[in-house]
Every structure is written in C-alpha cells, then in structure tokens.
Image: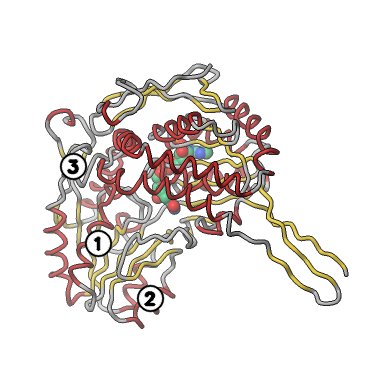
C-alpha cells in the first residue's frame, strides 16, 4: 500500500503537505510505504509537551527480512551505476533536504525537544551536507596501484560490500542517520537502516523525499522499531555483512557479540566523557563562551560535549564565576520559541536518568553551583522534560559523576596545577572520544594533543568540523572511523589484482 503523507505538525504553514494533527509513520521498503507486518505500533511522544503525537511501526524480524530482500534485489543495479549517476541521485536528495529545511527542522525539534533554532542552523543543514559531501567525494576517489617494475603491477579495486545495516541514535537524528547512509550509498551499497525509535520522524520524511524524487526502489530501506527487535534483527541477519552503529557503549558491546562471530565488518561510534582543559594563558572570554556551548549544546546530549572541565588553579575562581554566570543566562524554554537555547531532554526515561545522575553527584559530595533541578514551564510545555543546566565542583576525578557518561546538561569543574595532572585526570575514564585544550602556547597544545587518549582533539575550539577528517574514538568510545575517505573505505572491500608482466 502506498502511504500518502498526511502527518501533522503544529505549524502547518511550515509544512508543505497541508494541515495535519498527528504523525503516523510507516516503514519504507522496496520504494513503498508499508505497515509493519504484525501491525503493531509504538507511541511517539513530544518531549517538550509530554504528549503523544503519533505512532511508530513496531516492526519485527520479518520486516527486516523483507527490507533486506529489497536491498539485495536493488544491489546489482545500484552498485554498478557509474559514480556520476549515483552522485546525481544523492545530490537530488541534498537539494530536496535544502528545499524542505524548515519543515524538517520543525519535525526534528518536535520529535527530539531540541531548539528549533539549533535544528535549523545545524542538524538539517548538516544532513544536506552529508549527502553533498559523499555525492561529490566519489567523483574524486581513485584506486591505488603498486608498481613492481619489470615483474608486474597491482591495482586495488574498492568494491561495495553489499547490504549495509545502519543503526543510529536519537541525539542528532537526521544528522547522524545521514552520516552513515550517505557514504554507504555513495560507495555503491544498498542499505537497511533503523533510526532511533525515540526520534524517527525525520528519517520518515527522508523517505518521503526519496519517494517524491523517484529514487531507485530498494536502495535505501528504513525499518522503524525497537533496538532489541529491529536493531538486533539487522545485526543478526545473514545477508547483511556490514554494520555501522552509533549509540551507547553497552549496546555496542551487545552488537559486537553477535556481529564479530559472523565476521561482519563493524564500525562502532560509542559514548564519550570528554575533557575540556583550560590553561591560564588561554583566550579567557572565548574559552568561557565556547565551554558553555560545549557543555550544554543540545541539552548536553552530544557525544562530543565537554562535560569534565579542568581549569588551571590560577584562573579557577575567575573562570568559575564567568562560566556559571553565563550558564545562568541560558534560557530553558519551549523549543519552538526563537529565544530558546536549551530545550527539553529527549524522553521521560532520559529525564529521569539525568536527574538520577544529579542525585549521585550530590551524594558524592559535589557542590552545586547552579541548576540541579527539573524546570516546569508554563503553557503547552508544562508537562515537558526540562532540566536546568547544572554545574558541580568539588568532585574527585575518580567519582562516578566524573567517570560515567551522563549525556545531559550536567558538567563538573575541577582545578589542576600541572600539565601532568590535567593529563592524568583527562585520560582517567574508560572513554576516549574527544578532548579540548585551551592555551596560547603552541608547545603545550601539541604536547597535550599527542598525549591525550582520544580520537578527536580540538585546540582553542569545539565542534569545528571538517567532513574530510577521521571521526571516532578510542577505548570504549568505539572501533573504526567515520568521515572523509575513511567512511568510503569502511563501506568497500579492497580487492587487489596482481598482473605479471
Ligand atoms: P542506544 O545504544 O540506546 O541506541 C542506539 C541505537 O541502537 C538506537 O537506534 C537503538 O534503538 C539501537 N539499539 C538498541 N539496542 C540494540 C541492539 N541490541 N541491537 C541493535 N540495535 C540496538 O543509544 P542512544 O540512542 O541512547 O544514544 C545515546 C548514546 O549514543 C550515547 O552513549 C552517546 O554517547 C552515543 N553517541 C555516540 C556518538 C559517536 O559518534 N561516538 C554520536 C552520538 C551519540 P532504540 O532507540 O529503539 O532503542
């Protein structure tokens, strides 16, 4: 059955398909919108209001099997299209994302609780850019050759792997979903993908775009549902030889346990507990301003957020005062209001999890400098999941608050005296995704960057992204790298051909 898009958003003027009041999603398999085979649905909740506003298919293993078959059927054609043709299809998708940016941003904000301003400025433009970047990257890629002189020579083909399984989280829904799908498709794979069941709306709208532009059927298939059901079925499916996953470290472990014995290619982008190290010779104002953003952007729900802030003792009090004053100025409010910089956290379950971490920090003897409480707004958001940006000090580097990923608007401030001490504390967690260093001393910057255990180091900045660079973490923050040609390498198998002269 072809599903006509009639879903409902509160600002119909921004939505180009007419007035609607609920968003009922369907799977997109083989170029068709389909109900889940068992006709079961989950409720989708708007975290800013606490109200249900639509239904999500609760798909199962049989839906994944159907999607995998559609992807396998589409593979021979898609994988052998000239790169320029695949590129042209993907650029069409990018153009449509651009055209529908307001509608997609609104859907993202409603689904996730993030400020509409953030979804408009960051999430949706980045989803567009992911498609553009990989659509054009494949036009500039080249195979390697290895010359053996008079004996012969080698050339190495990079061939698509097959049906790729892509599983993504809720914090940057379309942004991270397309960060996987775009390189997978560009490299010539077909895809079976599952967005987080907590934030499925924009993945569904992406299907609407594919449908509207007559994107080749079966190349991208999206199956909605729970991680333990749809996600697990994708990971275990024998016809899906490659899995790209972004999410929590525990889920990553569970996926590895299933995928590794099946010898699947696996990319895991997992949790983080990132250090932000402020030296006394930094550009003070810039360090304060950016550290607040690094701590609380997207309500602290970015894997790269700097949640452990280490400050050289000589400027500790001054930094603390300026930082806390700025945090107190963050407006917690209705995500759809233009002035809002801090929206809702993503769900009731996550709201309760973050509040339980705040209770742990207090039990551990932390001194609360600001926040620490849920925020009850008035009007339509009175039942939403809002938490005041929260800052603690006086917590030991080894305590749970400084070791466990909270993934919410909670940070700690800790003084340090020497470079060695800052390094030891920064490197003391099980994670190793990103770290930031603030200093005007180039030697300190290089020394710290070389010795910090993290896959991504920012010096005097945060989240300054170049899509060509390798992205990913060490230790329990993951395995493998996304970004640039790293992702195209992951989504292809090298095949060496040796020719004797
Ligand atoms: P989860 O690990 O809970 O879920 C991620 C995705 O995996 C969801 O689609 C989820 O489905 C699915 N899933 C859950 N269980 C399984 C399973 N057994 N098999 C297959 N798939 C499964 O993470 P969150 O969605 O809570 O996202 C937050 C986490 O993601 C944080 O730890 C954060 O640090 C990390 N993250 C890492 C990034 C990085 O680049 N390193 C970037 C962004 C976030 P469902 O939603 O239905 O449960």
Q: In this view, does 32 lie to the left or right of 496?
A: left
What residue is shown at x 53% (from left), y 43% (from top)?
254
Residue underneath mark 3? 338
Q: Earlier in the sequence, mark 2 or mark 1?
A: 1
Answer with the quadrant where ligand 1 appears in the image. top left
The 10 Å Cα crowd at callout 2, few under 14, some 14 to 19, many 20 or more, is many
Can you give x and y, in whole percent of width and height, for residue 376 in the image?
14, 35
Q: In this view, does 133 lie to the left or right of 367?
A: right
Secondary structure of the residue carrying numbered label 1: helix
Q: Distance between the residues labelled 2 and 1?
A: 18 Å
Q: How far apart are marks 3 and 1 (CA)?
A: 22 Å
Q: Distance between the residues labelled 2 and 3?
A: 39 Å
Residue underneath mark 2? 448
Residue underneath mark 1? 291
Secondary structure of the residue carrying numbered label 2: helix
Q: Is residue 158 left or right of residue 416?
A: right
What residue is shown at x 75% (from left), y 63% (from top)?
155
Q: Is residue 214 above or below residue 138?
A: above
Q: Earlier in the sequence, mark 3 or mark 1?
A: 1
Q: In this view, does 10 lie above or below 339?
A: above
Looking at the picture, tell me which residue is in the foreground, 56 or 61.
56
Q: Which of marks 2 and 3 is nearer the N terminus?
A: 3
């Amino acid at each position: 059955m072809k599903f006509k898009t009639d879903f409902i958003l509160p600002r119909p003027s921004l939505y180009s398909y007419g007035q609607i009041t609920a968003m009922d999603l369907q799977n997109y398999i083989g170029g068709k919108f389909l109900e889940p085979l068992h006709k079961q649905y989950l409720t989708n909740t708007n975290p800013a209001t606490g109200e249900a506003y639509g239904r999500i298919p609760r798909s199962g293993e049989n839906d994944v099997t159907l999607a995998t078959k559609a992807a396998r059927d589409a593979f021979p054609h898609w994988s052998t299209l000239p790169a320029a043709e695949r590129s042209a299809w993907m650029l069409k998708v990018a153009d449509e994302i651009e055209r529908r940016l307001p509608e997609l941003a609104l859907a993202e904000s409603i689904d996730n609780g993030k400020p509409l301003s953030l979804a408009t400025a960051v999430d949706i433009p980045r989803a567009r850019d992911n498609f553009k970047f990989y659509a054009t990257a494949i036009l500039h890629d080249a195979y390697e050759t290895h010359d053996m002189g008079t004996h012969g020579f080698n050339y190495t083909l990079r061939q698509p792997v097959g049906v790729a399984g892509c599983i993504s989280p809720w914090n940057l829904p379309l942004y991270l979903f397309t960060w996987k799908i775009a390189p997978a498709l560009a490299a010539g794979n077909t895809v079976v993908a599952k967005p987080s069941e907590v934030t499925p709306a924009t993945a569904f709208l992406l299907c609407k775009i594919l449908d509207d532009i007559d994107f080749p059927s079966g190349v991208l298939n999206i199956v909605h549902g729970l991680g333990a059901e749809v996600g697990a079925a994708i990971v275990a499916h024998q016809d899906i030889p490659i899995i790209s996953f972004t999410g929590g470290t525990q889920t990553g472990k569970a996926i590895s346990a299933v995928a590794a014995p099946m010898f699947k290619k696996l990319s895991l982008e997992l949790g983080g507990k990132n250090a932000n190290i402020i030296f006394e010779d930094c550009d003070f104002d810039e360090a304060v301003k950016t550290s607040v953003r690094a701590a609380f952007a997207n309500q602290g729900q970015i894997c790269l957020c700097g949640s452990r802030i280490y400050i050289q003792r000589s400027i500790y009090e001054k930094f603390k005062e300026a930082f806390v004053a700025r945090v107190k100025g963050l407006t917690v409010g209705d995500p759809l209001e233009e002035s809002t910089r801090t929206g809702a956290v993503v769900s009731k379950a996550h709201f309760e999890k973050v509040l339980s971490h705040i209770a742990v920090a207090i039990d551990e003897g932390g001194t609360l400098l600001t926040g620490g409480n849920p925020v009850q707004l008035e009007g339509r958001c009175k039942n939403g999941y809002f938490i005041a940006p929260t800052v603690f000090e006086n917590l030991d580097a080894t305590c749970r608050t400084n070791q466990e990923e909270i993934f919410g608007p909670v940070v700690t401030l800790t003084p340090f005296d020497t470079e060695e001490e800052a390094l030891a504390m920064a490197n003391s967690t099980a994670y190793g995704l990103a770290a930031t260093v603030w200093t005007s001393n180039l030697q300190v910057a290089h020394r710290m960057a070389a010795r910090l255990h993290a896959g991504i180091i920012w010096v005097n900045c945060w989240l300054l992204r170049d899509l060509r660079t390798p992205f990913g973490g060490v230790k329990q923050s993951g395995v493998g790298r996304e970004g640039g040609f790293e992702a195209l390498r992951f989504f292809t198998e090298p095949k060496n051909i040796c020719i004797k002269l």
